[in-house]
Image (cartoon, grey):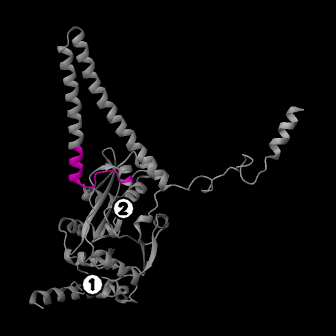
Amino acid sequence: MSTADDKQKAVEIATAKAVLRYSPYLAYRPFLPSECFVDVLAGSEGAGDFCWCVSRDTGFMQRLCYGGFLPIATPVRGKLRSVVLPKLHEERCVVTDLSRLRVSRSCRKRARKLEFSVDTCFEAVLDKCVEQHGMNWIGLLAKEFLDMYRHPAHGVRMHSIEVWDGDDLVAGEIGWACGSIYTSATGFTRESGAGSVQLCALGCLLRRRGFMAWDFGMGMQYKYDMGAQDVPRPAFVALFRKARAVATTLECARANARDVIDGTHAQTKKEGEQQEGEEEGEGKEGSGLKQAGAKDESMGEGKEGEKVQKAAKGRVNEEARRRKREKRERRRQERMRWTREHAGKGKDGGQAVTTSADSGTPDGGDGAGDEKKKKKSVQ
């Protein structure tokens, strides 16, 4: 160990002792120096949910996240003001199978009016989280999270998730990805239903981008409703280490939130630019056809001119019909996809009423009542 490392360690120990004078309860929790082996500590048992540390070095914070810890902070008396409490839950709330993610019909309907994006305004999302929750743990770590976003390293990539209503940022969250496991840290919402849309769209995006698991941290009912479950610490650490070794990326150009849920959006900025280019090309092609038609019309004189005009209009109309057919086909495919996903989930609990081949009445009936009514009417 170098002289600089020895000096840093001595400073950390002196700072920790000063903290303990005002917060003696921390003495019952493991202390983490910045040079500790995070993976070794993560694999140990019987340490409770929390550790504590005085270092706020960006690299150390990233190593904590890469080890499966969820860094939070708590205020303390004295010069330091607050200390970091890396948390590794004895039971972690995780969606271990993203293919079983549950998306409600009402959320899909609400998503049509909103837009979704990733990493377009990290600082704005962070500020709104602090504004909504106050100077709790997220407010005490805002600077550290911003530094981690600006300087990704140690296998950790910070992300901001955004939901828009026009130009208004109405919901979002801060989180990070380690390989193919994503951890949600905290979020905010300004509009009813927007938070649910953000979570559902994010979950569907994670599934399509190849993520193996979605780490929610502490268990709550709305997380269980989406398909999450509590995973014991040893199993979670094993899952986390397996998933972080599989590389993937979390990207999404700004798109309609319903399209993100359905998977019909451009997932990256490059794909979005290509899609815009294609749409622009189609627009120019249609404009060219109209101009050609107008030119043909001006050249047409008498009967020959009428034929030219009809041919020009026919080309324009055929192009318009082709686009309508494509639009109808896209809608038909969306309806088929929705029907497959919601098959057997009708109001009657998925039990269809069948018809008896002999009597023409629902199963279980003999049609006797109908026969009596007919005889009475004849009399």
Q: Which mark is residue 187?
A: 2
- Label the magenta part by its dominant secondary structure: helix
Relative vertical location of residue 197 with respect to residue 331 in this rendering, above or below:
below
Q: Which residue is tagged 1?
A: 38
Residue 278 lies in the magenta stretch: no
Q: Camera-side residue: 273 or 199?
A: 273
Residue 268 lies in the magenta stretch: yes
Name the residue: 51% across, 55% down. Answer: 342
Name the image quarter holding the N terminus: bottom left
Callout 1 crowding tier (Cα within 10 Å): few <14, some 14–19, many ≥20: some
Query: What's under tag 2, amino acid-wise?
Result: Gly
Label 2 SS: strand
Residue 139 image position (x, y, % from top left)? 31, 66
The magenta stretch is 262-276
Q: Camera-side residue: 167 or 290?
A: 290
* Residue 372 location, quadrant: top right
Relative vertical location of residue 285 with respect to residue 292 in this rendering, above or below:
below
Residue 331 image position (x, y, % from top left)? 41, 43
Can you name the residue that lies furthest to the right here? 379
Q: Is residue 81 visible?
A: no
Relative vertical location of residue 272 with respect to residue 300 in this rendering, above or below:
below
Sequence-first disc among 2 and 1: 1
Name the image quarter holding the C terminus: top right
Q: Which mark is residue 322?
A: none
Q: Camera-side residue: 33 or 346?
A: 346
Residue 373 image position (x, y, % from top left)? 84, 39
* Residue 86 location, quadrant: bottom left
Residue 77 image position (x, y, % from top left)? 31, 78
Query: What's under tag 1, amino acid-wise?
Result: Val
